Amino acid sequence: MANISAAKTFTAIVSVATLGVAISFSAGTALAQEKNVTEDQIVRALAPEKKPLTRGLSTGPQTTVDPAVTAAEGKFVQRIRGRSTRSLSSAEREEIAAIVKDKPKIDLEINFDYNSADISAKSLPSVQALGRALTNNDLKGSTFVVAGHTDAAGGDAYNQDLSERRADAIKRYLVDKYGINGTDLVTVGYGKSKLKDPGQPMAEVNRRVQVVNMENKATASNAAK
């Protein structure tokens, strides 16, 4: 009887231990999945804000848009479409940075292999979600800026080159895998010049790719009329 009781106790302990491992594994998987952005999250972040058809439909503050500024931005965007990343001057990079401040955008934490522009396996789900989002009917046909950023490790020239190569890698993947028109993707690198968290210059949050919707289809269509 003692042996039977001991066996039952051992079986119970093993069962509880197995259940604990299963719960821990499931929780770990959920946490890992939360780090990968979804297509829906990207679409919602990059979709242009819907404006009311008439002023009377909105009770919120009205934003006045200067047509001359909008036209100038449109001309600038058309000028840089199709340009290579390295061909952009520092002045053009800063002009892009100024324009994107008020545009729909999302920061993606996309990891690359060390000292490389090769997208890491763990970041592929986020890049694939980006590809699906940019071919979504709500975004397809817009012009997007793909901006590469690094943390503060290393020199200015090194980080500038690395950020440009990484932005190019994202563009190449989107064009090759999702058939996105290359001229709809403007790639730019900022190196370590625009840290997301200046207080922690070496933090992972600074190693990111920012995607910005520069021109939505509705605006482009209305401007042409």
Image (tube, grey):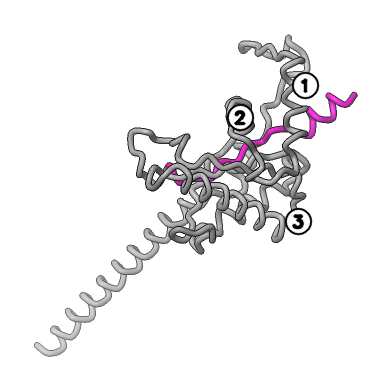
Which mark is first along the chain, 1 or 2? 1
Instruction: Report the front residue among 12 and 105.
Output: 105
Q: Which residue is drawn at 55% across and 59% down?
A: 124
* Label 3, residues with CA under 10 Å away: few <14, some 14-19, many ≥20: few
Residue 27 inside the magenta-drawn segment? no
Amino acid type assigned to the residue bearing label 1 in the image: Ala
Q: Would you name the residue on which mark 1 appears?
A: 71
Front residue of this view, candidates 209 and 127: 209
Q: Which residue is drawn at 67% across and 52% down?
A: 132
The three-letter code of the residue at mark 2 reads Ala
Residue 138 location (% of width, % of height)? 73, 40
Determine the residue positioned at 74% across, 20% down.
Answer: 70
Span highlighted in magenta in the image: 206-225
Mark 2 neighbour density, 10 Å: few (under 14) some (14–19) many (20 or more): few
State the image coordinates of residue 217 (x, y, percent, origin top left): 79, 34
Q: Name the residue under label 2.
A: 91
Q: Name the residue under label 3.
A: 179
**Residue lying furthest right in this view?**
225
Q: Pick the quarter of the image with the C terminus.
A: top right
Does residue 168 sit above or below 2 in this rendering? above
Dot 3: element: loop
Find numbered disc 1 in the image and state the secondary structure of the residue it sits on: helix
User: Marks 2/1: CA distance?
Assistant: 19 Å
Q: Nearer the viewer, mark 2 or mark 1?
A: 2
Residue 66, percent from left and from top: 72, 13
Comes first in the chain, label 2 or label 3 = 2
